[in-house]
Image (cartoon, rainbow, N blue to C red):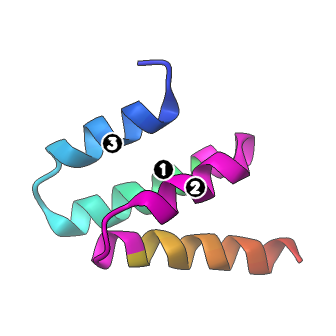
């Protein structure tokens, strides 16, 4: 899988544990945002509402705050 979005969704959907989903979403965002921050943020915004999306949005906010 060469498309980061497809890869992230594929792996995320296979993690049944919500804590692992949050951890994966946060780590995935951080890694992806280094190469394509706009696409990474769009992915976070497209996540279904819930704890996983909230965790990824917090990671995005923290990263943005660190960059300013």
**Residue located beneath label 2 in the image:** 42
- Whether the residues at callouts 3 and 2 have beta carbons within 8 Å, the answer is no
Disc with the residue nearer the chain's start (1 vs 3): 3
The 10 Å Cα crowd at callout 3, few under 14, some 14 to 19, many 20 or more, is: few
Is 37 on the left or on the right of 14, as rendered?
Answer: right
Q: Nearer the viewer, residue 27 or 56?
A: 56
Q: Residue at x 44, y 59 (%)?
A: 46
Disc with the residue nearer the chain's start (2 vs 1): 1
Residue 52 vs 54, above or below: the answer is: above
Query: From the viewer's perspective, is the residue at label 2 or at label 1 nearer?
Result: 2
Residue 41 vs 57, above or below: the answer is: above
Magenta-tinted stretch? 32-53
Q: Quadrant of the N terminus?
A: top left
Q: Quadrant of the C terminus?
A: bottom right
Query: From the viewer's perspective, is the residue at label 3 or at label 2 nearer?
Result: 2
The 10 Å Cα crowd at callout 1, few under 14, some 14 to 19, many 20 or more, is: some
Please tell me whether mark 2 sits on a helix, a strand or a loop.
helix
Residue 67 vs 5, above or below: the answer is: below
Checking the image for residue 28, the label placed there is 1
Quadrant position of residue 18: bottom left
**Residue located beneath label 3 in the image:** 9
Residue 1 vs 42, above or below: the answer is: above
- By secondary structure, the bulk of the magenta-drawn segment is best described as helix
Q: CA distance from mark 2 to mark 1?
A: 13 Å
| Residue 39: % across, % down | 63, 47
């Amino acid at each position: 899988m060469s498309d980061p979005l497809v890869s992230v969704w594929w792996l995320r959907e296979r993690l049944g544990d919500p804590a692992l989903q949050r951890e994966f979403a946060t780590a995935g965002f951080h890694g992806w945002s280094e190469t394509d921050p706009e696409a990474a943020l769009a992915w976070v915004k497209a996540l279904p509402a819930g704890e996983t999306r909230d965790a990824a949005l917090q990671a995005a906010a923290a990263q943005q705050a660190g960059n300013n």
